[in-house]
Amino acid sequence: MNTFSSKLLEAAVNEFSALPGVGKKTALRLVLHLLKQDSSKVSAFSESILRLKNDSKICKVCYNLSDYDVCEICTNPHRQSDLICVVEDIRGVMAIENTQQFRGKFHILGGRISPMEGIGPSDLNIDSLLERVQSIPGGEVILALSPTTEGETTNFYLFKKLNGINVTVTTIARGVSFGDELEYADEITLGRSILNRIPYKVGNS
């Protein structure tokens, strides 16, 4: 148990340790690091977090984090509008964009179906996905969820919903090991998985 000589220090450490994956010792190191910085650097750090919280928007089309009402990927005329890659969250978008192998657009579900966590289809951005897909007859939907039990359950649910619509449903090739989160896959492996995607079939995942 840490004994703090300052209530201000303790409060700052408590705030940092509330972040995912940050324990008390790491939080203390981060706070002490900030204390050594010039006030201007600390102010810039604080301002960037406040601006992110107050000024960032959620794209009205794909639900990506954006500086505008519609994100730059959705408004880019050089991206394929009839190719939609479905991911769980912004980390999936960033992981796939880093491969530089995908030129379509995205749709962020906002999670994955997980009865254990009380997350059902109605809690995800599925209805809006179906509306988008209706506007791209003959297009393709790539299911690029993390290859976990919950991810596969969500893939299957989406496949059933998309099955009656005139689109091709594919999934990323299994270069990413089962149980791994998409964001942790290396760029080369993930890039190949996107390029070598295969038609989705029940049981092929």
Image (cartoon, grey):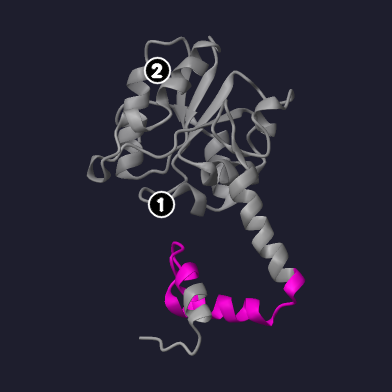
Compute the Cα span from label 2 to label 1: 25 Å
Between 173 and 3, the residue placed more toward the observer is 3
Q: Residues within 10 Å of mark 2 (few under 14, many from 20)?
A: some
Image quarter in which the N terminus is found:
bottom left
Q: Nearer the viewer, residue 44 or 204?
A: 44
Which residue corresponds to mark 2?
162
Amino acid found under the numbered disc labelled 1:
Asp
Residue 201 seen in the current view: no
- Residue 202 at least partly seen: yes
Residue 8 counted in the magenta span: no
Kindly identify the residue that appears in the image at 37 percent across and 38 percent down: 112
| Most common SS among magenta residues | helix
| Disc 1 element | loop
The residue under label 2 is which amino acid type? Leu
Between 110 and 38, the one lying in front of the other is 38
Magenta stretch? 13-40
Q: What percent of the width, then of the height, locates residue 47?
A: 68, 58
The residue sitting at 36% across, 48% down in the picture is 178
Residue 145 spot, x, y in % from top left: 43, 38
> Seen in the image, is 172 located left or right of residue 30?
left
Disc ID at residue 180: 1
Q: Residues within 10 Å of mark 1 (few under 14, many from 20)?
A: few
Q: Is residue 25 magenta?
A: yes
Q: Secondary structure at mark 2?
A: helix
Q: Mark 2 or mark 1, which is nearer to you?
A: 2
In which quarter of the view is residue 190 placed? Answer: top right
